Image (cartoon, helix red, strand yellow):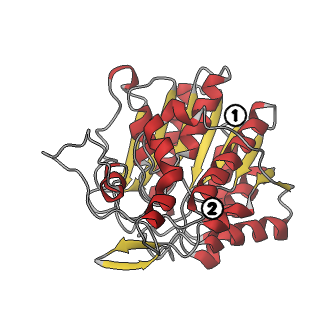
Amino acid sequence: MKTVFSPRHLGHSNQLELMAGAIVPGFELPSRAQYIHDRIVEVGLGEIVGPKEFDLSIAARVHAQDFLDFLPTVYQRWKALGRDGTALAYTWPTRGLRGDVVPECLDGALGHYSFDAGCGFVEGTWDAIKSSHDVMMTAAEMVKNGAGSAYALCRPPGHHAGSNFMGGYCYINNAAVAAEYYIANGAKRVSILDVDYHHGNGTQQIFYNRADVQVINIHGDPNQEYPYFLGYRQETGAGEGEGFNINYPLRWGTDWATWSDALKDGVKKLEAYGPDVVIVSLGVDTFEKDPISHFKLKTEDYPKIGAIVKAIGKPTLFVQEGGYAVADIGINAVGVLTGYEEA
């Protein structure tokens, strides 16, 4: 399996975020990607290549153009205000407020285009976002051109980003753009299987009314867990999308036995849907030692995930999402990929 990776992700470094009442260093660290890269080399998974350059025309099919236009401007506008450090939102529209207005002021615009204070901007953030998008597009093209599988080692991740909002360390929704890329290139049906601990709320929001992209999420119960406001079992799609959004919310403390039952049931629904290609939003923050998560999967469980995905028998694109137990992320993420390759 080929991996696509760009060192440009390092531009998004030393950013801050708001968590539990404090401004703290971002949990989404550059070392996450490097540990995975080094593990790929160690186990000999396959060739690692750099990304091609792509425009944002496919991204503009799933994201609002004004949102995409906003992202590259943030840090320059922040600096023009005489500010240093991390550009962060601190105020958001909510029920009863005007969510349809984009304020001229940067602080208001940051709030308009985000749902939390986890998406900070430093000088190199936009370049890292764009490189993450290009990493995904390069890997997606490999699969379109006949590779049975490919791995997009994306950083920043993407699955919390919606059509017109960022959040949860995610700016452009790489998995969603990949799905749209396959549809634009002739696929009739695409399945996104999101195994990250946190619900892929952005992916759900983007495709909720569509029948050509099935979205399956296995995640922490939003009654307990971020992002809280989507991910409930009764959210099954709307209009043409009814029945094509499937959520498996699981309680804190979930172990492999319970989690794998959800995965196997999700795979049955995926196989019944009959996609032309499968996209795996690969988060490994289900790990028992993850510092911001509450599931109990063990290192030996991750190759089993890969084997289950391989048995689907469809072209598969893996897109990196979360995982914050940095010392273990390489072993666990690559464990899924080797499990897939060896099945």
Residue 58: where, in percent of width, then height? Answer: 60, 32
- The residue positioned 40% from the left and 47% from the top of the image is 165
Residue 337: where, in percent of width, then height? Answer: 72, 55
Reply above or below: 230 against 121: above
* Residue under pointer 2: 302
The residue most toward the left is 96
The answer to whether residue 332 is seen in the rendering is no
Q: Mark 2 or mark 1, which is nearer the start of the sequence?
A: 2
The answer to whether residue 187 is seen in the rendering is yes
Amino acid type shown at disc 2: Tyr
The total of numbered circles placed on residues is 2
Q: Element at badge 1? A: loop
* Residue under pointer 1: 314
Residue 187: where, in percent of width, then height? Answer: 64, 22
Q: Element at badge 2? A: helix
Reply above or below: 69 against 301: above
